[in-house]
Amino acid sequence: MNSSIAQSRRKPVNPLWIAAAAVVTVAGVVAWVVQLTQGMSTVSLSNLTPWGTYIAGFIFFMGLSAGSLVLSSLPVLFDLPRFRPYAKLGAYIALASLIVGGLYIMVDIGKPDRLWRIVRYAHLGSPMLWDLLLTVAYLIVSTVYLRRLMQAKGDDKGLKPLALIVFLAGLADGLTAFVFATQIGREYWYSAVQPIAFFVAAVASAGATILLVMTFLKPSGYVHLECCDLNPISLLTASMLGLSLLLIVSEMVTLAFSRSASATELIDLMIASPVFWVEIVSGVAALLLLLIAPLRGGGTAQTVTSAGLALVHLAAKRLTFVGMGFAVENIDYAGVNIGSVGAAMPTLVEFGVALGLLGLFILLLTVGFNSFQLVDEPRG
Amino acid sequence: MAKKHYVMVVDTKRCIGCHTCALACKVENNLPDGVWWNRTLTVGGDEMDTPEGEYPNLQIGFITLACQHCENPACVKVCPVGATWKDEETGLVMQDPDKCIGCRYCMVACPYTGVRQFNFEEPQFAAAVEVGSVDAFNHQKHTVEKCTFCATRVAKGQEPACIEVCPARARTFGDLNDPNSDVSLLLSKRPYFQLLDEKGTEPSVYFLT
């Protein structure tokens, strides 16, 4: 192969993108230092809303990691040649999002210097421990799987047992949901539908991210996309988005039907929340665009718009999910002020930290694309 | 030693909503500014200490809200490092600020609104000197704290500070496992309710009606 072509295929991302992502990441680190030194009063949390943007970020990226693992394992496990190009890519996205997801917890914790205590004094009954163990499992599984995929030459057969483990690890994203769904004090979370809803959103976020990445990488020649190559992943993302929307309807109906005071208040607050409407409108729009994409040949603009809207839907979904957990007080008699109820606008520091981690995610991806060939040619 | 089950009984017919218990708690435990382990809530209007209804048909009542020292505590189940635990000998739900990693999962899990509080910054104190008990809780930035039923006083055979100061004698503290204790006798004679008992947490605070 001509070495200059090989060179151009190996560095598909303009260094300016990488530099921009690095700057955002560094800004995030600065914001985190401010948060640690000046205290968490610099973020929009309160005694009555103890979790917020960071936990939403954690759910999103843990989901992205799990969904990417599932998509990555499908072609190897079930011999699906049209998904084969995403095997390595999925494993790499899983690893990058796992690192970022873990860091969202790190920045949320008041005493990160005591994080080692989770290992030393592990209380295995805590759903947070289940999630930690899942995170460690993801880290090991995705690293080993990615390494094997990088080394694999042509034949996927030996990879199948590993792909099965990867697939099962991805399915276990429901464990993250148990952090929330087990909480009897939080009416909006306390539902057996959450593990399913988390999984569905996880696969949708992975599909949308892969669609965006593939479209972004196309002009450089790093990936070779024919007109309809993205159709299967578009349809898979669409079906998961459709299910995700259906589950929202299902939740709303079961809540509304009870007509209990707290359920009615929850529904009223959701309807009054702009983030909830962003979630609904972007979700429906993304679903429609993804469904008609195959019919119209799936142009670049359409793919970027639909995948972008899907990610907006999923991010808004996480913000709504966390916020609504604290929207209704179980005991709401008047007393001394100990903090505000419900999600508040993120502060500058909080926005900086959250954006910094998003920057790190983009940094990890772009550096990965420039260092490794992460997308294979379709096989079959 | 027989296991104890310390409970608190609050007579809502006696409580006059004077907030003395909340202030005594603040002093005894040297609580930082903005932190309230025990609060007097108004069962009435939308603002504290206001009645509901229209003159002359006004109604007002009070409940005091602090950690319920549940028999089935939601907070203990979720703490990833065991910084909050149930003391088997006394039934008290304890909190160790030296172990807390500040993840606030216990605040999320506890259904009793706002009884667990987080030091969002370095604790600041209204008084220039430390007040209250010599073995008062060690308040730390970015950790969670809450009512301990004045565990250090109880260990010395004293009652929690909020019990001692109540001018209406609305509060009673004691061992529910002792059938002759004041709390056992009160609960056998008077109707009572517990907060959010439908959540299954089995709180150790009883409100007489």
Image: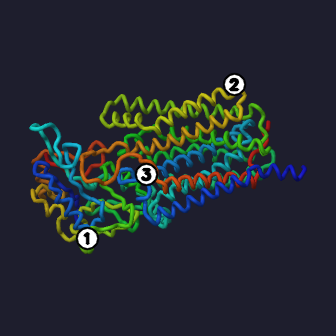
- Which amino acid, by three-letter code, is at mark 1? Ala
- Which amino acid, by three-letter code, is at mark 2? Leu
Q: Is residue A380 left or right of residue B98?
A: right
Subunit of label 1: B
Residue A124 image position (x, y, % from top left): 46, 56
In front: B146, or A130? B146
Q: Quadrant of the N terminus of chain B?
A: bottom left
Residue under pointer 1? B127
Which image quadrant for residue B95?
bottom left
Q: Is residue B97 visible?
A: yes
Q: Secondary structure at mark 3?
A: loop
Residue A173 image position (x, y, % from top left): 54, 45
- Which amino acid, by three-letter code, is at mark 3? Trp
Residue under pointer 3? A51
- For disc 2, the neighbor class at 10 Å (few under 14, some 14 to 19, many from 20) is few
Question: Mark 3 or mark 2: which comes first in sequence?
Answer: 3
Which image quadrant for residue A375?
top right
Q: Is residue A261 left or right of residue A322?
A: left
Q: Secondary structure at mark 1?
A: loop
In this view, the mark in front (3 or 1): 1
Q: Quadrant of the C terminus of chain B?
A: top left
